[in-house]
Image: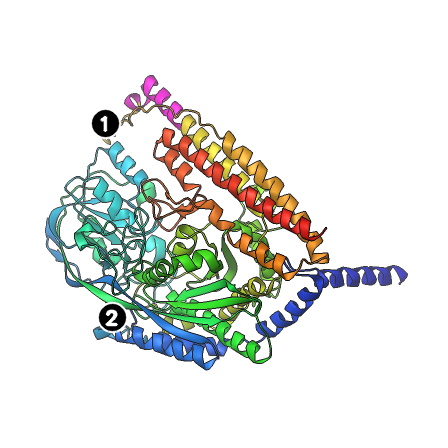
Amino acid sequence: MRNLVAVVLILTFNLSAAAQAAFTGFTAASTQTERDWETKFRAIPSPDNQREYMRRLSARPHHVGSAYDKDNAQWILARFKEWGLDAHIETFDVLFPTPKIRILEMIEPTKFAAKLDEPAIAIDPTSNQKSEQLPTYNAYSIDGDVTAPLVFVNYGLPKDYEDLDRLGISVKGAIVIAKYGNSWRGIKPKVAAEHGAIGCLIYSDPADDGYFVDDVFPQGPMRNPNGVQRGSVMDFPSSNPGDPLTPGIGATPGAKRLTIKEAQSISKIPVLPISYGDAQPLLAALKGPMAPESWRGALAIPYHVGPGPAKVHLKLEFNWDLKPVNDIIAKIPGSTEPDQWIVRGNHHDAWVNGAEDPISGQMALLEEARAFGELLKQGWKPRRTIIYCAWDGEEPMLLGSTEWAEAHADELRQHAAVYINTDGNGRGYLGMGGSHSLEHLMNEVARDIEDPESKVSVWKREQLHEIREAKSADDRQELRSRADLRMDPLGSGTDYTAFLDHLGIASLNLEYSGEDAGGIYHSIYDDFYWYTHFSDTTFVYGRALSQTVGTTVMRLADAEVLPFEFTDLADTVQKYTKELEKLLKDKQDEISERNRELDEGLFRATLDPRRPTVAPPREDVPPFLNFAPMHNAADALTRAAQRYDKTLANAQAHPPNSATLQSLNEQLIQSERRFTDDAGLPRRPWYKHLLYGPGVYTGYAPKTVPGVREAIEQKRYTEADQEIVRVAKAIQDEAALVNAAAEQLEKAGQ
């Protein structure tokens, strides 16, 4: 019994100590106050309210420029005001093309006309709103009228064209058909045009999001034979997101606009998305070599590559109109440091009804705003200013957020500490992506949020999920021993892009996902009926998202010292440097081996004359690169981060005065900016962040240290050496800032 009492006492002490542990950036006393307010906040968000927000906002199609898009904007504005927030609408006029003519037909060897239509389903009440629905199309495709043989190109990525070269197949003068998936959709027409194709079709194969995965809608969640993924093909990774006619500046009434022909982000060839019901007759008519096994999908046909004998005619014509986007901006003024801003956003526009994308994220944002309104009535006053943003025009390519960020760029560079984004939400595990100076903060927050299903913390559930999915014993060991779970880097594809990649504002992107498959993305079937039958049907993960994001907003807005932490960042920079060295080594080994095989006559000797292939070309082995500047800079950042951690811990016990705090926080706000360069990334100056960026040939997916990584991938080795030096300087600048912040705290503690 005595031993049992001792154990209970020890456990009680440990739990009490954990409960009293100071949050990063807070003193012990202010931590308890913050904990009390956060507990009150997390009790407020209501699944029932979120359900009604979704029902209302997704009741009708609400794409850019539509009547219901404007109606939703006014409704959101009214809710912000009702909850006591200072709110207004900012409008920008942007280029948003919509289709006039869409024709796709096979003219050889047989006749076939694509339906290009998603039919209403009787059980799904909003699927019949035909007069308000945008047709199936890809925004920012050029007009075109082309006829050519068809070639199947798998997912339409650079590697797929290398495989076509091995098969002796050229797409020059052809129309290609590519599967959705494995990259952002706009990469497919971009790469096709670079290889000489004159048109591009994109379809969703049932192996990826149809009957191969689960039952199709309405019996199940997956894409049915008529479902089509609308979406933008604006070439934003190589140029910029936002309005194509006003790159780098807000699309305000007096803004100087490019002509459509001058716009760099509009596609080079006509592009059209189609269903697998429309794709199957086209693919079935192809002959030529059998597609590689890894290319074959789940349609009941032999997958041939072509070209021909299928020949198709594609005609597209668009209305190239300016349309208004309406951003709703709400503000909660800060009480102590009002010139430091925490910005929170989610978009409200959709391709059609958009229950999952974006209303499942927007409803969480609204409940956060309502909860903050309740806390304000109870006497809570955030230290910093909080700005809530409901963006318009995200779907065509981040129009509303980019134009607002460009229009307010100078203010944001001076005042914005952090931007927090969501887009959609489902059931499952917490997904955390963002600036790695915020990695420790997000781990702290995740430990305080209860998972609705397992009832453990969302941190613990995600840790165990990652252990289950880990590929190696080393990965499992790190997950069990590292204090913080690693956070994903950010690329693009949603509204944090202008804040992080262009302005250098530390950013986060958060969601719950991983338990529900879905095949209704960007179709008419992404609606209230689908979401309430196949996703977060009880809306408890919507509440969890509100609790997670709202707690993060509060922690950032209330901390005496902005809760940036730099040891996780330094560790991440070290990791990225090692990854780059491995990338180069792998390239050297791969090319050396291939050249050796060419010398040995391997490809000639193993050629199957019935299935002929072309030997790959000989290449120069990549040279060695000098990574020493990055290693030295990463070591400097590691030392600076350790020094800052130590001085911050001392400051929590002996807090500096208000003037020192304000000066320190103003310095910390600039920490993410140190990773930016005004010259931008090579050949794409709009993207200024040197650690994170969207890949030129991936789109949404991130490329870490993109200037170096893509130079290696694209065999620009002199450029890679130059970029290493530039990135190293940015890391050294970050280390200098962190050292300066530590020095401020050290002086204040003397």
Please tell me whether mark 1 sits on a helix, a strand or a loop. Answer: loop
Q: CA distance from mark 2 to mark 1?
A: 52 Å
Q: Position of residue 480 (x, y in %)?
A: 63, 48
- Above or below, 311 against 532 in this view is above
Q: Amino acid at mark 1?
A: Pro
- The crowding category of the residue bearing disc 2, from other C-alpha atoms within 10 Å (few below 14, some 14 to 19, many at least 20), is some
- Tell me if residue 250 is in the magenta stretch: no
Q: What SS does tag 2 mark?
A: loop
Residue at the far front in the pictured view: 659
Give the image quarter of residue 423. bottom left
In the image, residue 682 lies at what x, y percent?
34, 40
Residue 365 lies left or right of residue 286; in this view the side is right
User: At 59% from the left edge and 46% from the top edge, which residue is drawn?
Assistant: 740
Q: Out of 673 and 509, give the one closest to the viewer.
A: 673
Where in the figure is residue 50, as x and y percent of width and height? 46, 75
* Segment tinted magenta in the rendering: 590-605
2 and 1 marks in contact (CB < 8 Å)? no
In the image, what residue type sits under mark 2?
Answer: Gln
Residue under numbered circle 1? 609
Q: Is residue 183 above or below residue 162?
A: below
Q: Quadrant of the N terminus?
A: bottom right
The residue tagged 2 is: 133
Q: Residue at x 50, y 36 (%)?
A: 577
